[in-house]
Amino acid sequence: MSDLVIGIVIGLLSSAFFAIQNVLIRGQREGVNALIANSIKMWVSLPLMIVLVVIPWRYHEFLLPPHVLLPLTISVLLGGAFGDAAYLSSQERIGVSRAFPISNTYPIITYLFALFLLDDVLRASTSLGIILAVIGVILVSRELVTENTEKTEIPYDWRGLALALASSIMFAFATIFMEIGVTDIDPIDANLFRMSIGSLAMVPIFTFSYKSRTNPLSIKAVRIIAVAGFFGMGFASLLYVASIKLVGATIGAVIGSTAPLFALPISVFYLKERVTWRGLLGTISTIVGIWLVVSSV
């Protein structure tokens, strides 16, 4: 089996893990806000990475050359810390239905950066595929924005729009630097370092969010998020890093953005939500887009 096929499969598994995690914690927003939830997910993922590094049956020793430290640090800070914080802040200002489509344009921006920074080749089929996949993911994600999440119309806010665009750019750079950092090392070693840096970065974010709360944290919500994050962010982030190593930033970004595609059927069966033409059209568009991107390699 080729690296391309393996990379696509584990990338889709990563997106599926992220989707399951997001569905499980969707109902915990009152007990734990998003920034605190991200901190918890990062912290419970770190012990998993440590265990995977020290298990005795690994075929090589832990290896982290100095030249990979900076790109891996940039990747986790822009992706897991600052990028997520910018997106969540934009979501509070302009709502999920506006913030998510803007932030989720990052596969397009990743491709543009890859053309200049990673010497990717400009292909019409790749460009069309990425655009179709992004449009499809946006349609599916809007399907998942239920009446319970946005009951009132949120006015446009230029700061919220700017934050959403900034998050997209940061996610794109995070993906590019991840490919640079993981090229010559094992994904497990790379992700242990990323989770370590990310865990440290989340300390001030958690502290600020916790002190800003007016209601106490829900212990039940914290437990649910910790369990979901252990399997979601823990395994999903490792699989995502491995996918980027095998298929590169452009394909990896497209595959990594498909979590809403998996969340849709889960929401239908788990949360009893209905599917409209928008969700079906988005699913088809995403699948066709992914096929175009992969077939153009």
Image (spheres, helix red, strand yellow):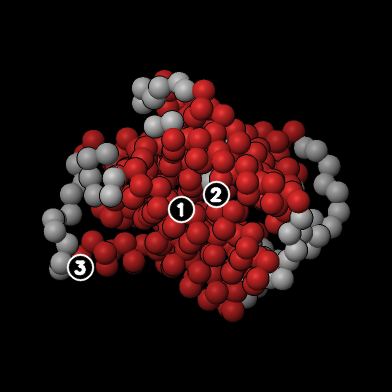
User: Badge 2: how crowded within 10 Å, few (<14), some, or many (20+)?
Assistant: many
Query: Measuring 26% from the left and 53% from the top, which residue is drawn there?
Result: 189
| Label 1 or label 3, whichever comes before in sequence order | 1
Residue 140 visible in the shown view: yes
Asked whether the beta carbons under mark 1 and mark 2 sit within 8 Å of each other, the answer is yes
The image quarter in which residue 133 lies: top right
Which of the marked residues, 1 or 2, is nearer the chain's N terminus? 1
Residues under labels 2 and 3: Cα distance? 31 Å
Q: Residue at x 44, y 38 (%)?
A: 294
Between discs 2 and 3, the one toward the N terminus? 3
Q: Position of residue 159 (x, y in %)?
A: 71, 36
Please give the residue where the numbered disc 3 appears in the rendered image. Answer: 55
Residue under pointer 1: 12
The number of discs equals 3
- Residue named by callout 2: 258
Which mark is on residue 241? Answer: none
Q: Is residue 171 visible?
A: no
The residue furthest right is 152
Horizontal side, residue 159 vs residue 150: left or right:
left
